[in-house]
Amino acid sequence: MTRPKLWAVIPAAGSGQRFSKTDLKQYQKILGKTVLEHSVNALYQLPLSGCVIAISTQDTFAEQIEFVHPVQFCQGGKERMDSVFAALKYLESYADANDYILVHDAARPCLHVDQLRNIEKFCQTGQNAAIIAVPVRDTLKKSKANQQIESTVDRTGLWQAQTPQIIKYSILYRALQHATQHQLHVTDEASALEQLNSPIQLIEGRMDNLKITYPQDLDFAKLVLSLKQPT
């Protein structure tokens, strides 16, 4: 039996308004490389067969980057799921039904080697889908409209979703096709699978696998990445 291949998909067509109205977070520099380069390089610690980055039609920067590893580009869409679906269509001629797609945030550059080992172990089990996630640690508060506390939310069983989200090609394709046809709003790939009651495994991740959302996150990412640099 042929071992399934691993393909990376990076949706990078979003505008990231919480970071800046003008500057795209994935192209900010940390330690001499863009955030996107760090994200791609981290994924390529796995035996990837390829990496597809979905970018917007207005993006004139991504294809100028001299990536260390091979990447391909496709035109992304308005929403995250549109970009991921576009990348899956790009891979139709290359990926088999049981190959694994690793969907990873463009602005999540700090993947740790332990997480990558756990992803590789999962892909050897033959299960359909998993996501990297961390159990919610802090007390959660629900607010009223005026930002006063309404109640405390029970955090038992709650996890904070991260990426990569690791899903067999055919499973993810069907889930995103269903979400598109029924005009469902899904914020990540697992949400699309949930609509079809498809089982998804949780792989415990790390808190330092941060997604850059605000400008101050760059400082934390720089600290994490500097600790990985050879001494």
Image: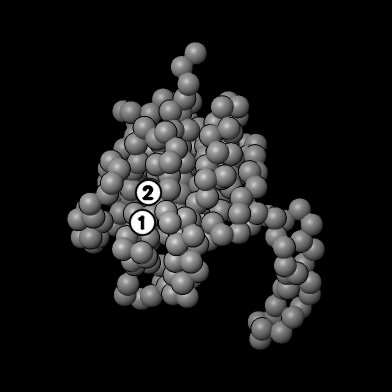
Which residue sits at x=47%, y=75%? 216
Q: Secondary structure at mark 1?
A: helix
Residue 52 location (% of width, % of height): 33, 43
Name which residue type carries label 2: Val
Residue 221 location (% of width, % of height): 47, 65
The relative height of residue 4 versus residue 87 in the rendered view (above or below) is above
Which residue sits at x=48%, y=66%? 223
Name which residue type carries label 1: Leu
165 left or right of 53 in image: right
Residue 126 location (% of width, % of height): 58, 26
The relative height of residue 89 versus residue 216 in the rendered view (above or below) is above
Q: Nearer the viewer, residue 108 or 161?
A: 108
The quadrant of the picture occupied by the C terminus is: bottom left
The answer to whether one can see residue 198 in this image is yes
Residue 167: assigned label:
none
* Residue 96, quarter of picture: top left
* Label 2: how many Cα within 10 Å (few below 14, some 14–19, many 20+): many
Q: Secondary structure at mark 2?
A: helix
Residue that badge 1 annotates:
36
The relative height of residue 227 versus residue 48 in the rendered view (above or below) is below
Evaluate if marks 2 and 1 touch, with contact meaning CB atoms under 8 Å apart. yes
* Label 1: how many Cα within 10 Å (few below 14, some 14–19, many 20+): many
Q: Nearer the viewer, residue 10 or 191?
A: 10
The answer to whether one can see residue 180 in this image is no
Residue that lies at the very extreme toward the front in this rendered image: 231
Residue 51 location (% of width, % of height): 35, 41
Residue that badge 2 annotates:
40
Q: Nearer the viewer, residue 102 or 223?
A: 223
The span from disc 2 to disc 1 (Cα, nearest Å) is 6 Å
51 left or right of 140 in image: left
Which residue sits at x=59%, y=33%? 122
